[in-house]
Every structure is written in structure tokens, then in C-alpha cells.
Amino acid sequence: MATKVEQTTNEVLHFIGNFGASEKPKPIDNKRKLLRRQSTVRDLRWNVKISGFAQKTHNPIRAIVDGLTIVPNPEKKMIALSIGDPTTFGNLLPANEILDAMKKVIDDKNFNGYAPSVGFIEAREAVAEYSAHQGVIKEISAKDVILCSGCSCALDLCIAAIANEGQNILIPKPGFSIYRTLAEGFGIECRSYNLIPEQGWEIDLDHLEELIDENTAAIIVTNPSNPCGSVFSKQHILDILEIAERHYVPIIADEIYEHFVFPGNEYFSMASLSKNVPILSCGGTTKRFLVPGWRLGWIIVHDRHGAFSEVRQGLLNLSARILGPNSLVQGALPAILKNTPQKFYDELVETLQNHANIAYSMLKEIPGLTPIMPQGAMYMMVLLDMKNFPEFHDELDFVQSLVAEQSVFCLPGKCFDIDDFIRIVLTVPKEMIIEACERIQEFCENHYRPPKIDEEIDDLATNFIKITDF
Ligand SMILES: *Cc1c(COP(=O)(O)O)cnc(C)c1O
């Protein structure tokens, strides 16, 4: 049932919607023609400019990929290990319970109208319950949940609610490019903190702390990670929280891959471990339920001692800009979150772990490559030993030649703000992963130049240190 406030909002919306219709159209005034004159205050030509906001908004991935020459070898069928959409190849499908929930709301015909801009109360309750049931968080209720059009929209509102032009937010390197896309339009500076590959992509905590200053509005933490597939330990999350607490910096937790961890690893949400640091947790149905196109995300406000009372209001204000996500998906959400069987989640994770194991064991045998085994999510990062591929200037060059010769496309590390890596997506069908790894092997064997003998001993000794060195 909708609350009073929400009912009133709906009535206001109806009122606004009908207002124009009650006025009679004005008769056309022919005399107006005589009064037509040229403006004296405007340029007398079309001079329509892009807004500063639009100009400052970029997707770095687009810019980098558009700059590449992607011409596959016509003899070989293209394999795209680049696409972060798990539905692309049709091998991973949403559970029937998810599809049934959606069919039912369409047939019910009850969800064709507007919802309150923060979402239907039933859907928000369902998210609160889902997060309490699977995490350790008991105190969350519907009033702490705001529904958005996907997790990107949730991140957008959080950044907009918490940071001003001229302030900065701290983001992971390597990291998902959307944070930069969202923040830079607002004139918010993005400062990248390093993740350390040989420590399972944990945050370089000293570096993180060095970046904090009086203008730091928030730290964004992605766990599990895109592009790394890393999952932070409980202790590591406590260490991050300790730094945030000492400097009074709130956290925006991008937890779109929550619970998406391989057996043997455990997922801890930031909020479940935070005593004093206020946290905005962003999630949604996109990845875990395999429905990115349904565009349903959420923000959960994990306040601590009232630190977020203004931010909470800010998020409510900003939700008036989006008028909430699609009503049909909101209508289906309670059933989706309650009825999706554990077996579906488990099988999905098992498939991805299986793909990760296959790709890892194949890639680690290839000269010049060092894959880093993920613990969750849908991706694996692979380090390229560029000095053993002297033909290629950088990993962009490597990626272009790999497409040209083997028709395998991976996103270069630069798309995630890091050099010398490529990211491979693990959601493609198993046969394609195997085929792609075989072709990558052939490619590397053709281009690998072994180090000279005297360098080799040196190289063995520095090998471990080298990959920390960026
Ligand atoms: C896919 C992804 C998102 C965006 O999710 P949508 O719900 O499609 O907007 C956000 N963060 C990360 C890390 C992602 O990989």
C-alpha cells in the first residue's frame, strides 16, 4: 500500500497531467502576423551550443575503442571477449521465476502508471528485505531505499547528492569508467587510488589515504570488482573503513556484484561492517539476475548517527529528476527478489568460476601473459609483459593486432585507467572461451621475443617486483 505522502504525490502528478487539457485552445490571432519583427537582443543566426555539462561528460571506453582499428581476420569468426553484457550470447538466461514475475505484472495491468519518484513502497520494502536477508544488516527499511534506472543511475544520484563542483571523489584504478563519466560533467575531480594486482587487487591503503584532502566528498569502493573480479576480505574492508572513519569521508559502495563470489570466498557488504562510516550502497538486478536491459537499480542509505540526514533529503530531491524507474519492473521486483531460487544464483556463479578456471589455466601457460585469478564477478585481468612483445608499442597496439590476426577482441586496460593489461569477459560460452584462449596462445607464440640469456636470470629475480611497478 502506498503511504499518504506518496498518494498525495500521485494526485499532484495527475493534476499536473490534466491541467493543460481543461483549457480551450486559443483562436489564432491573425493580427499577430503584422507584429512579427526581428529580435534586437539575439544573434540573428542559429547558434545553438552544447551545454558545458554535456561537453564535460565523456565515456572513456568509447573514446578509446573508437580510436582503435578493429578489423577482424575474415578467415576467423569474431569472438568478442569485450562485452560486459551477460545476455549477449544467449548462454546465460534469467530464471523462469524472474520472467514469470514480469509476465504477471503485464497481465495484471496494475503497473502502467507512475510510481512515486523514489519507487513503489512495496518494491522498496522488498529491496530492504532482500538486503537484510542476505547481508547482516537488520535495521534497513523501505524508507532507506531509493529505486533508480539501473545501478548507473543510482551512482549518478549518489555522486550528485554528495559532491560539489571543485570537490573530489576517490575512485579505483583500475576501475569501471562510469564514475568518471558521471562526476566530470559536474566538475567533480576524480582521483584514482591504486589497486595491487599481486595482493588480489586490494586497495593500496597508503595511496588511498594520501589522496584524501579537505575537498574529498566520498570514496567509491567497487566490491566485487569490474574489471578485476576481486572480492575484498573482511579485514580489508575493515581497513578501508578505518581510513574513512579517521578522515570523516563517507563511502559510496558500488555493490552491483554483491553475492557474486566463487565458492570458498565470502562476500561482505561495506555497510555490514561499518559502525560509524555512513555508506550509500548501490546495487540492482542487472548482473545477478541477468537482466541489464530492465534498468532497475537502487540506493540503500546506510546512515550512521544521522550523518546522512542532509544527503538523504538530497537524494529525495534528486529523485524528482528521474521520476523513478520503469513501473513494470518495480511491480515485478518483490516477486523477483523473493522467488528467484538459490539454485539459479549458485549455477550462475559455478558457470563463471568454471570459465575463470579454464581461462586461467590456459592463459597462464602462454609466454608473456600473467592472468590474475578472480574470486567473483564476471571478469579477469591479464597482464601483458610488453617488453617481450617488442613489436607492440602498448596494449592498444597488442589488442588491435590480436583482432586483425585472430579475430579476438578484449578491452585494453586503458579503458579502466591502467596500462599493460587486457580484460576478458567470462560470460561468453565455454567453447568460445577455449577457442579464444587457443587463438591468443597462437598470437602470443608468434610475437613473443624471449629475453636474452643474461637478462633472463635478472628477469627471474625482478619478475615479481615488476608487476607491482605502476
Ligand atoms: C554493470 C555495472 C554497473 C551498471 O549497472 P546498470 O545497472 O546496468 O546501470 C555499475 N557498476 C559496475 C561496477 C558495473 O560493472
Image (tube, rainbow, N blue to C red):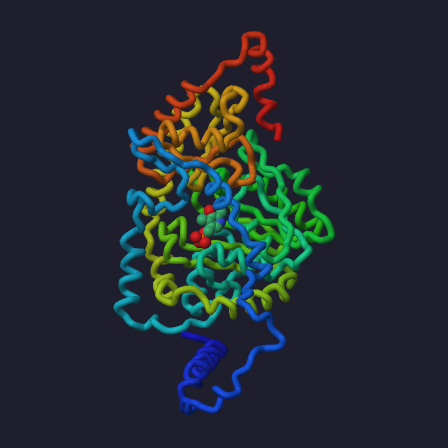
Residue 247 versus residue 72 in the image, above or below: below
The answer to whether one can see residue 41 in this image is yes
| In-front residue for pair 83/296 | 83
From the viewer's perspective, tell me whether residue 123 is left or right of residue 462: left
| Residue 366, position as x, y percentages in the image | 43, 21
Residue at 73% in and 52% down: 214
Residue at 43% in and 57% down: 130
From the viewer's perspective, tell me whether residue 272 is left or right of residue 111: right
| Residue 416, position as x, y percentages in the image | 53, 40
Residue at 27% in and 65% down: 104
Residue 88 versus residue 437 in the image, above or below: below
Q: State the quadrant of the C terminus.
A: top right
The answer to whether one can see residue 375 in this image is no
| Residue 402, position as x, y percentages in the image | 41, 29
Residue 343 versus residue 160 in the image, above or below: above
| In-front residue for pair 177/11 | 177
